[in-house]
Amino acid sequence: MAQPSIPLISKSPRCFSSLACRQHEAQIRQRKAAIRQQIQALELSRRKFSSNSIHRHGHLDPPKPGEEIHVTFIDKDGEKYNFEVSEGDNLLDIAQANDLEMEGACGGSCACSTCHIIISDPDKYDAIPEPDDDENDMLDLAFGLTETSRLGCQVKMTPALDGLEVKLPAMTRNMQASDFGGVNPKHH
Ligand code: FES
């Protein structure tokens, strides 16, 4: 399926006049509309090519002894799922490798918002490199955006993030309580 092109927004727009402001707002609206179209196209193609699109089973190498980094996922019902992971693993891959149902419709290319997560601890949030413009654009489209929201596919684990706790938003397309049925994540 041909992807709609996303119009570029001029760099560093400055509001010299209300006309410039309106033009910039129109550019942003146009870009967001194009992004929404891309997400819809991605989700359509995903459904087309997978009869069981929810279940993906990624693979991550286990951490070396002594280099384990701990991360906890909390679903919308408050259930906690703890994992030991390696430096460099991202949150989308961790969720999918452990059969947690984070959708990741674009495959981790920062072109959707279905891997939206919320960092519980603001200090840990600050320890993650800041989101770039693409991630911020996608976050704008996420349900239940918060001050400590990120896209799971863009957050890589580092030793500084040991003990990271991430929540799935109450309204999300990326994980439902029912999705945990029949799988066996480490559940503590
Ligand atoms: S999987 Fe699409 S933005 Fe993360």
Image (tube, grey):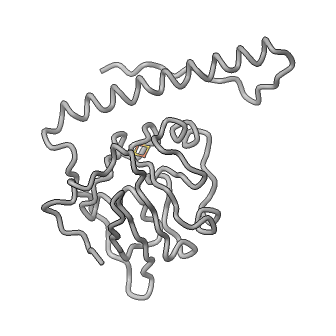
Residue drawn 20% across the image and 54% down it: 178
Q: Is residue 31 above or below residue 117?
A: above
- Nearer to the camera, 76 or 10: 76
Q: Is residue 115 above or below residue 3?
A: below
Q: Quadrant of ligand 1?
A: top left
Residue drawn 58% across the image and 74% down it: 160
Residue drawn 82% across the image and 22% down it: 15
Residue drawn 78% across the image and 11% down it: 19
Q: Residue 119 in the image: x percent, y percent? A: 52, 61
Q: Quadrant of residue 16?
A: top right
Q: Is residue 163 visible?
A: yes
Q: Residue 130 in the image: x percent, y percent? A: 63, 54
- Nearer to the camera, 165 or 14: 165
Residue projecting furthest to the front: 77
Q: Is residue 69 above or below residue 79?
A: below
Q: Residue 13 in the image: x percent, y percent? A: 76, 26
**The N terminus is located in which quarter?**
top left
Q: Is residue 94 visible?
A: no
- Nearer to the camera, 171 or 50: 171
Asked if residue 171 lies left or right of residue 139, the reply is left
